[in-house]
Image: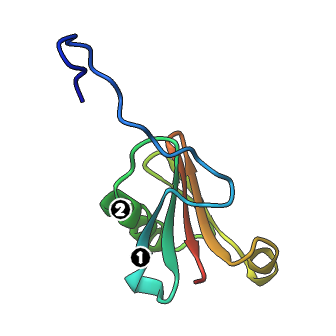
Amino acid sequence: MMLANTGIATASPTKSLSPEEPIGNCGVFPRNAPLQIENWNVGTVSCAEAMHVMNSFFDAAEKYATVDDWKCGIFGAAENEAKAGIAVQCKGPRGVLRLVSP
């Protein structure tokens, strides 16, 4: 957005990251429905990239794996319950991706 007659560009307002709320919900993860992919990002990550990360993690067939610049881990039943339904979490320099129970 440009300010009138100044030529100065201003940034669009951005949503602040709340620890209780993901920035985006990318919907159901088809490989493990009904889990949903949540975006908890400090940088821009598209839903297509989030889906790629989760698919690549499941292709690795390990409890912990690094996908591109994301470090991912799958939680067991006790961890899942303690972390309020989080099944998989991937952390990277641009934020956090999670597979969660709806």
Picture quadrant where residue 47 is located: bottom left
Residue under label 2, please give it: 47
Residue 84 or 32: which is nearer the viewer?
A: 84
Q: CA distance from mark 2 to mark 1?
A: 9 Å
Residue projecting furthest to the top: 6
Q: Residue at x 39, y 45 (%)?
A: 44
Residue projecting furthest to the front: 4
| Vertical comparison of 32 with 68: above or below | below
Question: What quarter of the picture does the N terminus occupy?
Answer: top left
Amino acid type at circle 2 is: Cys
| Vertical comparison of 31 with 12: above or below | below
Picture quadrant where residue 10 is located: top left
Amino acid type at circle 1 is: Gly
Q: Are marks 2 and 1 in contact (CB under 8 Å)?
A: yes
Residue 96 is left or right of residue 52, and the answer is: right
* Image coords of residue 75 (percent x, y): 70, 73
Residue under label 1, please give it: 27
